Image (spheres, grey):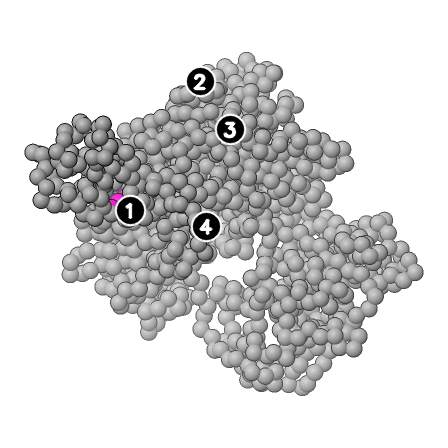
Amino acid sequence: MQVPAAFQYERATSLDQAIELLTRYGPEARVVAGGHSLLPMMKLRLAQPEALIDINGLGELALIRVDGHDLAVGAMVRHAELLASPVVGEHFPILRDAERVIADPLVRNRGTVGGSLCQADPSEDLSAAFSALRATLVAQGPGGRRTIGIREFFLGPYETALNEAELLVEIRVPIRSHASAYRKVERRVGDWAVVAAGAVLEISAGVITEAGIGLTAVGAPRFVAEQAEDFLRGGRPDDEGFAEAGRIAAQECRPTADQRGPVDFKRHLAGELTTRALRAAAARAQGQEA
Amino acid sequence: MTTTEERPVGFGRMPRKEDARFVRGHGTYVDDVRLPGMLHGAILRSPLAHARIVSIDTSAAEAHPKVRAVITGETLAGLGLAWMPTISYDTQAVLATDKVRFQGQEVAFVVAEDHYAARDALELIDVEYEPLPPVVDARRALDPDAPVIRDDKEGQTDNHVFDWSAGDKERTDEVFAAADVVVEQDMLYPRVHPAPLETCGTVADMDAITGKLTVWSTTQAPHAHRTLYAMVAGIPEHKIRIISPDIGGGFGNKVGIYPGYVCAVVGSIVTGKPVKWVEDRSENLMSTSFARDYHMHGEIAATKDGKIQGLRVHVIADHGAFNATAQPTQFPAGFFSVFTGSYDLAAAHCTVTGVYTDKAPGGVAYACSFRVTEAVYLVERMVDVLADKLGTDPAELRMRNLLRPGQFPYRTQTGWEYDSGDYPRALRLAMDIAHYDDLRREQAGKRERGELMGIGVSFFTEAVGAGPRKHMDILGLGMADGAELRVHPTGKAVLRISVQTQGQGHETTFAQIVAEELGIPPEDVEVVHGDTDQTPFGLGTYGSRSTPVSGAAAAMVARKVRERAKIVASAMLEVSPDDLEWEKGRWYVTGDPDQGRTMAEIALAAHSNLELPEGVEGQLDATCVYNPPNLTFPFGAYICVADVDADTGQVKIRRFVAVDDCGNRINPMIVEGQVHGGLADGLGMALMQVIAFDEDGNCLGGSFMDYLLPTSVECPSWELGETVTPSPHHPIGAKGVGESATVGSPAAVVNAVVDALKPLGVRHVDMPLTPAAVWRAAQGRPLRTDLAIT
């Protein structure tokens, strides 16, 4: 049995109390939500927080709502809940696609949407998916609430724009007419992505008016392929353009080699999966299931 | 849930007797053992692959309020236990004294009041290392400038372990020189790990007053362990009791003795308290026995019309830092010489060179019957390479070259005597189940559309049930197994056996063997195993040997009891034993079937005041030792269908057909379960499992995030078939099946994927066939899967 080092445990019963506890314990405290990244790291003693602030009791963060024109996903929503949500499935197939290939049912039952984003693991799927969607994150700290665009949220591997004692409370995505898809290659179900790509297309009168491309596990800054997005915007949604967008995405990402694959393969996959995700999104825009 | 199925009295399908406790969480594993006053051990391991130990400072750890003892190599040296013999006549450091030789090697052992404190105290031990260059690539281990790993061994000036050969070199060279067609292929069977669900562990309890050492241990071979503890530690054998309780999978991983076991024993001696040590997952993957790691070069010779004539093989075998391979002593490369496979060859020759590297020791039969997996993989890949060269269908080429039923018993070019088989029948059945011709037609259509679909065939002959004690022993202990059977006065029985289940279902299978022989229900037979104070001597469970060896012992001892019952029955019926006949469960008078006695009646009489003939003792029991006359040779034909996405390298195994012939099946349900498990295991090896190392010797497979086991999602719905060719020399005609599927399946998977990639000019891809490996092979730039990907 792998056992963690000693730590203090606090169970928060309200958001304010959670922030108060985070303030009291300082930078050596960690928030535990689903625990599926943090606890293994603690057992391997790669992480040795002095205190764990358990926010599993914060039911107000566990809701999926439609709020005005936005989909609002609470930070404590479990992966399985996001996957099962009809409103998410209807408007954001990219999230459904991603959730179907995140870990396995056991992890999805416990792991949270907010936890996934805050972990900022460079191979995480929802980070790429929500970045493609240009989500807005709502954070709350001792000084009150603020919003952060997701493309300003990820500062680097395992590093986010959250301040000390600040909690991610909600992820908001505008519900608008767009099509999306997510494609992933993994060595085995439950493994981290070798590479994955998400695509979001807004198409008006046969022209792409906005594009979002999220990439994970390839060192893409802020999980996106901006040059490929720029290329697509204003173009036509056709296979030729999607192939070129894939080529651009492959060039702009910065994969590193590991046992999931060498750099050339990951770069190739970044392009291939970008193209495939774009094609699938475009097919959905035509009302075809992809 | 209710079942209307009738339970068999003897062989047949029945649910496993042991499952009731397992599915209810009532198993008792080593980690469940809790003794009064028990302390907890933890091992400090080397972060480096190769380094000289300059100093070890344990003072801070000793000062921890909950720590009771800190043991180092120096402590052990004082007891003469710093090094221990391996089962391959090498030595292995229990705790490192001079150098560390692989990442994860045992350096110090802490005994504390609880597991958390023991683990915390490890971080208080200060070890100063002087790093040395590591030997990582087995293919370069014998380079003249390679650092010498085993400078502890007198006269050792390089990393050479052994050279071994089999077959007739001259004759093989002649056959190759005269052959129409010769093809060669390099291939790697990568280092994999058995990764049982339960990791290894021990609770050691030395009673200072009685001098008796009781060891609860995760062992597949409790009796062999007891003898080895006696020989190595000098504790009298009758004062050692090894208990192997429920075991959560072994697959060869629990054959050897690990440093942690020895440390727990020493910890108990030093503290006077029971000491528990159970390793964690990373420790299991990084330090306990691996399997395979064979770097092979194969050559195959044939006539131009596809008659296979010869095989020539050279292997570099990576044995890690200590040669701790588990196999019969006279077989340093295990049974690799069965690499001639299922074919009638004119000549064959192989050489195996074992080398040391800075990696964990081991080389166990990971569900592979002593290197038969490597051998089958080699020959079955070579046959496909030949088929590709000749432009012949691989199934057709096999059919043309398989041994014929009339050729058995068949002596191979490397000296094995295959006992029985009907190989073409098994292959035909597999092809029928798969609809082989339809699959080929579908493939042709897909190829025209540019889609990649592959069909892989493999045919294997297993060599299991080691073995005849004249030829096979482990450290001088002959590989025979004992059995004791007692029938209680009320007709219920207890069978005591020497082998130890790790999930194979012995409590059911062995009860069924006795049931078949005595004609009493399997529910009435209690099977006792896994406790050296309660069971007869024997070498344990690995290499699919339980049914071939111990199963034979169970049948033979039951027949002895049946014969004794006959004499008792003759006294009861007042007739001569010669006038009695047996029907299942009952002796009766010839010509007068109503006059008879059941086993229960006989059992009661055997314990009663019934007057027995002169020289016949009362009661109803017997013992026996079974020394197998030969191995048994199960075989099978496997067909795999794979779809490959060339642009992502993803492999989808669509279908898998497995026809197994393991002789008579005692419990077909258990056999099928074992085949299912073995197929999943083999598919895992083919597609995802590998313990690779980076250039510094860091282990890259040290957790289940890095060392991947297959899930139900990757596995197709297995399609099983069977033929039955009973072993002619086995008392119940059984052959063993535990490892067949693991042996046969990897080649089928790889053959399927290579077949799929054929339009791209690919002739071989090394396992594991990850997306990266497949894509790079398709690009003509294959990966070295045993090293860090760069």
Disc 4 to disc 1, C-alpha distance: 32 Å
Q: Secondary structure at mark 4?
A: loop
Residue that carries the numbered disc 2 in the rendered image? B406
Chain assignment, label 1:
B
| Residue assigned mark 4 | B195
Label 2–label 1 contact, CB within 8 A:
no
Q: Looking at the picture, how far across and down is residue B512, in whole percent?
A: 34, 42
Left or right: residue A118 compared with residue B94: right
- Looking at the rendered structure, the kind of residue marked 2 is Gly
Question: Mark 2 or mark 1: which comes first in sequence?
Answer: 2
- Look at label 4 and name its amino acid: Ala
Q: What chain does mark 2 sit on?
A: B
Residue B420 horizontal/vertical position (percent): 41, 25
Say which residue label 3 marks: B426
Q: Earlier in the sequence, mark 4 or mark 1?
A: 4
Question: Quadrant where the N terminus of chain B lies?
Answer: bottom left
Q: Which residue is mark 1?
A: B525
